[in-house]
Image (cartoon, helix red, strand yellow):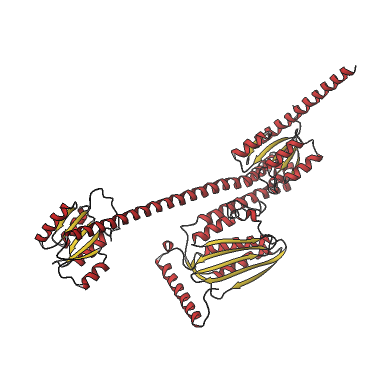
């Protein structure tokens, strides 16, 4: 089975980490973009809503941390899946993140095969969601059509 | 000398009578016994001291004039080995000199013979009360000390907890970077030789990330080691002014990219103290580094040094961005940093404060956004006495003596020592 590449946006203020993480994912065929703050992330998504997964750091400076970003992101781009990846893991942020709709929560340094698995899982979930919406729209359209004819 | 330990008594007051006149001793004992005291008898000073070792005695009533060991001498031994036992001295020929000497040696009171038994019983009760109050005070002090120690331990643990969590978190980030770099290198190295050869640049970049990660973790662990290095603490005569100049030399590189003027406000010879020069150098490096980082492109760093009696005051001021009010209280917390991850560990000021406190000093900060920040370190000329070896203590005395002489000179020439 041919693996469909995911479109991934890495959001982290650790530029060195973002760079090398992106290189590794690209080496495996994923399409990777990067942002270094919550604001940059949201700006990027406004123009690129087709991102499958955002890999989001939690502890970021600049007045908008990962949790704030997740909240805003899910409001504006509900279909984009978010994988929280943090070096500062606490039970509180994990619970909060999941309640806010994150796909999963991983601790740095995370096992790479697990990251790959989660990225693929998130990409598939986004695909399924889109599929469901498409079908629902079709049904709605059909019903509408039925009323007309 | 035996330490002064108090024992709690549940019985009535235990009274020891010491007198070489056996008849008098017998009569007095009977009369005191009738008044509810538990009475022990000894016909000489040494016999009395033996009984004190064995029996629960609160108050000693003792004749001054006795052969072998007189009352004053016996009193001295009693106070030396049982400092919480009260002593009432009795004498037939009241002499002022004996009285003065007795009180000087710690006697509770002095009663002249012939003895009014009710007066004596009253004095014994007063002495017993005094002893009980002293015991209570001591118990309270011990409890307070214990509580303080518990609180300190709790604070230390809390601080250790914050520190360990912080360390784990801060190390996770560079570890993640190193892990990704290593994984990336493996992906490339698993390809054929020709491809590997063509990807040398990529491998080099990944390697660079690993080196950066190691460097970050190394900085964290080294700072922490600096923080906990207690056993290696070595006090010696320390010239703060010389340390400041050394620090500035070390910092030249750090300041190369910016236009930073260095100013000095130092009082001549103000900075000779007994301290740990290695620890103090770290304090200065941390403070000057912060000052340099606070200045964006151009500004001034002022190093100040002044003596205030038995303290020196070191100030490091910058004309940088200043610290906002809402975070100024947090700057000494471990892992609190406003710098980007590759610039600051968030440990600098935490460690700095730890060192300053360990050296018996205090650190404070004064900052105004847009105008700059001043850190003030106040250090004692001599560190806490418990930490000092005899040699250090001698050095301390010598320095304090010099200060005293300088102060006297200032006074003689009409100048104050404090600046």
In the depicted structure, whether residue A47 falls above or below residue B241: above
Q: State the quadrant of the C terminus of chain A.
A: top right
Q: Residue furthest right?
A: A149
Is B252 rendered above or below residue B139?
below
Q: What is the x, y in percent for residue B413?
A: 51, 83
State the residue at coordinates (14%, 55%). Answer: B31
Q: Is residue B350 above or below residue B100?
A: above
Residue B234 percent location from the top left of the image: 47, 63
Most distant residue in the bottom direction: B413
As drawn, is B49 to the left or to the right of A113?
Answer: left
Q: Position of residue A7 (x, y in %)?
A: 76, 36
Quarter holding the N terminus of chain A? top right
- Image quarter for residue A39? top right
Compare residues B325 and B400 and report the one nearer the observer.
Answer: B325
Q: Residue at x 63, y 39 (%)?
A: A93
Q: Is B109 positioned to the left or the right of A146 in the image?
A: left
């Amino acid at each position: 089975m041919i693996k469909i590449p995911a479109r991934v946006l890495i959001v982290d203020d650790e530029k060195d980490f973002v760079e090398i993480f992106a290189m590794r994912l690209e080496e495996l065929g994923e399409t990777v973009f990067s942002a270094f703050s919550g604001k940059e992330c949201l700006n990027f998504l406004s123009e690129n809503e087709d991102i499958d997964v955002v890999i989001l750091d939690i502890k970021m400076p600049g007045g908008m941390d990962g949790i704030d970003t997740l909240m805003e992101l899910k409001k504006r781009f509900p279909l984009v899946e978010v994988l929280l990846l943090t070096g500062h893991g606490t039970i509180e942020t994990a619970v909060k993140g999941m309640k806010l709709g994150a796909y999963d929560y991983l601790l740095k340094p995370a096992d790479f095969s697990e990251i790959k698995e989660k990225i693929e899982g998130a990409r598939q979930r986004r695909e399924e969601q889109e599929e469901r919406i498409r079908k629902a729209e079709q049904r709605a359209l059909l019903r509408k059509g039925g009323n007309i004819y | 000398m035996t330490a002064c330990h108090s024992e709690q008594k549940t019985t009535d007051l235990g009274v020891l009578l010491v007198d070489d006149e056996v008849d008098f001793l017998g009569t007095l004992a009977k009369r005191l016994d009738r008044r509810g005291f538990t009475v022990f008898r000894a016909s000489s000073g040494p016999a009395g001291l033996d009984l004190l070792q064995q029996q629960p005695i609160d108050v000693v009533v003792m004749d001054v004039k006795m052969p072998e060991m007189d009352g004053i001498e016996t009193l001295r031994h009693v106070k030396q080995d049982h400092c919480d036992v009260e002593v009432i001295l009795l004498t037939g020929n009241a002499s002022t000199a004996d009285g003065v000497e007795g009180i000087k040696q710690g006697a509770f009171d002095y009663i002249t013979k012939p003895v009014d038994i009710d007066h004596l019983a009253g004095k014994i009760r007063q002495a017993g009360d005094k002893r009980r109050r002293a015991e209570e005070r001591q118990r309270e002090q011990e409890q307070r000390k214990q509580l303080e120690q518990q609180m300190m331990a709790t604070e230390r643990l809390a601080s250790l907890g914050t520190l360990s969590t912080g360390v784990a978190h801060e190390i996770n980030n560079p570890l993640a970077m190193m892990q990704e770099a290593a994984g990336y290198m493996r992906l490339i190295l698993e390809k054929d030789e020709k491809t590997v050869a063509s990807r040398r640049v990529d491998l080099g970049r990944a390697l660079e990330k690993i080196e950066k990660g190691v460097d970050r973790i190394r900085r964290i662990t080294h700072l922490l080691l600096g923080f906990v290095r207690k056993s290696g603490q070595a006090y010696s005569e320390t010239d703060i002014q010389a340390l400041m100049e050394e620090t500035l030399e070390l910092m030249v590189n750090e300041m190369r990219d910016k236009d930073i003027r260095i100013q000095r406000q130092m009082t001549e010879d103000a900075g000779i103290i007994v301290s740990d020069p290695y620890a103090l150098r770290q304090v200065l490096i941390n403070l000057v580094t912060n000052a340099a980082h606070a200045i964006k492109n151009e500004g001034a760093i002022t190093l100040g040094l002044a003596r205030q009696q038995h303290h020196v005051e070191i100030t490091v001021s910058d004309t940088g961005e200043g610290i906002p009010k809402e975070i100024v209280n947090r700057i000494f917390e471990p892992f609190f940093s406003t710098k980007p991850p590759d610039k600051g560990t968030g440990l600098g000021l935490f460690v700095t404060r730890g060192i300053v406190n360990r050296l018996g000093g205090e650190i404070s900060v004064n900052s105004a956004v847009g105008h700059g920040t001043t850190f003030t370190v106040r250090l004692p000329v001599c560190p806490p006495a418990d930490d000092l070896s005899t040699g250090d203590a001698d050095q301390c005395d010598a320095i304090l003596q010099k200060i005293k002489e300088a102060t006297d000179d200032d006074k003689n020439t009409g100048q104050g020592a404090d600046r």
